[in-house]
Image (cartoon, grey):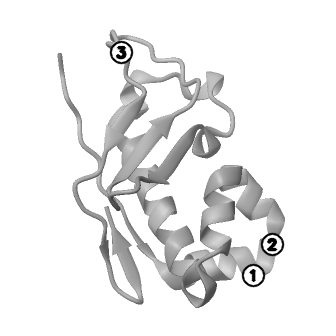
Amino acid sequence: MQVQTGIDIIEVNRIQEAIEKQGQKFIERVYTKAEIEYCNKTGKMMYQHYAARFAAKEAIFKAISSKISIENEPNIHTKIEIQNKKDRKTICKLRKIKFVKCRTYGLKYISHKRICSSKLYHII
């Protein structure tokens, strides 16, 4: 079985600008209801949390993109959900993604080792 990795870095202000310009349309196109609920509860750190989730989704997408058919996966970002567990670990839940060219072995969750953050950037 081949294991792939993905990495992404995002400037927090890019996500902030997208949210401020496009509003709810952008948020609902990229984030799940649970992610929106979580990020909106974080107060002045809201944009950092949205940015961290965006970078995580992009990193996961890069790791699995060769195993899925993009045409058959509209709204791929909302099918990748970043969740915080009670022990503060972050996991990724894959929702109804159809994998091709591989056996998924029941793959539903992906664990992140680190989300590195600053006020300006997030890297996954």
**Which is more toward the observer, 99 or 111?**
111
Distance of label 3 from label 2 (alpha carbons): 35 Å
Percent position (x, y) of residue 72?
A: 63, 22
Where is mark 3, residue-wise?
104
**Which is more toward the observer, 108 or 118?**
108
The amino acid marked with disc number 2 is: Gly
Percent position (x, y) of residue 110?
A: 34, 38
The amino acid marked with disc number 1 is: Glu
The amino acid marked with disc number 3 is: Thr
> Which residue is pictured at 42% across the width and 33% down the height?
65
Q: Which mark is residue 23?
A: 2
- Which residue in the rendered view is the most extreme toward the front? 86
* 96 in relation to 26, above or below: above
Circles 1 and 2 in contact, beta carbons < 8 Å:
yes
> Which residue is pictured at 23% across the width and 34% down the height?
4
For label 1, the SS is helix
Circles 3 and 1 in contact, beta carbons < 8 Å:
no
For label 3, the SS is loop
Percent position (x, y) of residue 100?
A: 44, 13
Where is mark 1, residue-wise?
20
Distance of label 3 from label 1 (alpha carbons): 38 Å
